[in-house]
Amino acid sequence: MTRLRGPHSLRTRLFLGIAATLAVSTVVMLAVGAILTRQSLDRDRAYVRAERSSVKITSIAPAPSSGRVVCTANTTTSCCATASVLS
């Protein structure tokens, strides 16, 4: 006589256990990924804000003979280019 497999068979319990483990691990993975991505973006935004606020042009003076603008601070070339356009 063969026994009918009910909802409490070993195969069903193993399948449900594996499916539940897979679902929980997927949710945890997505949550941790979202948190780490958000922290990384916040850190990048804070770094850019700090860089922008620390860029101070200490002296912009025209060169004696050419009339060009000279940046004499720790700035990027885009800052110097902006300064030459503004003057």
Image (spheres, rainbow, N blue to C red):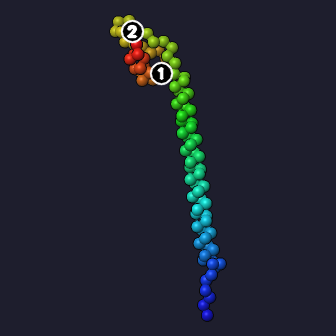
Tell me if residue 52 comes above or below residue 40 in the rendering: above
Real-space Cα separation, disc 1 to disc 2, in angstroms? 18 Å
Dot 2 lies on which element?
loop
* Picture residue at 38% right of the left edge, 17% below the top: 85
Q: Which of marks 1 and 2 is nearer the N terminus?
A: 2
Mark 2 residue type? Ala
In the visual, does 69 lie left or right of 35? left
Q: In the orientation shown, which residue stands out farthest toward the top?
A: 64
* Picture residue at 61% right of the left edge, 93% below the top: 1
Query: Which dot marks residue 12?
Result: none
Tell me if residue 79 comes above or below residue 19 in the rendering: above
The spot of residue 68 in percent (x, y) is 37, 12
* Picture residue at 43% right of the left edge, 9% below the top: 61
Q: In the orientation shown, which residue stands out farthest toward the left?
A: 66
- Write down the residue under mark 1: 75
Q: Residues within 10 Å of mark 1 (few under 14, many from 20)?
A: some
* Picture residue at 59% right of the left edge, 57% below the top: 27
- Write down the residue under mark 2: 63
Check contact, mark 1 vs mark 2: CB within 8 A: no
Q: Quadrant of the C terminus?
A: top left
The spot of residue 50 in percent (x, y) is 56, 27
Res 63 quadrant in image = top left
Tell me if residue 31 comes above or below residue 53 in the rendering: below
Q: Residues within 10 Å of mark 2 (few under 14, many from 20)?
A: few
The spot of residue 77 in percent (x, y) is 42, 22
Tell me if residue 5 comes above or below residue 44 in the rendering: below
In the visual, does 39 lie left or right of 79? right
Dot 1 lies on which element?
loop
The spot of residue 18 in percent (x, y) is 60, 68
Mark 1 residue type? Thr
Q: In the orientation shown, which residue stands out farthest toward the right?
A: 8
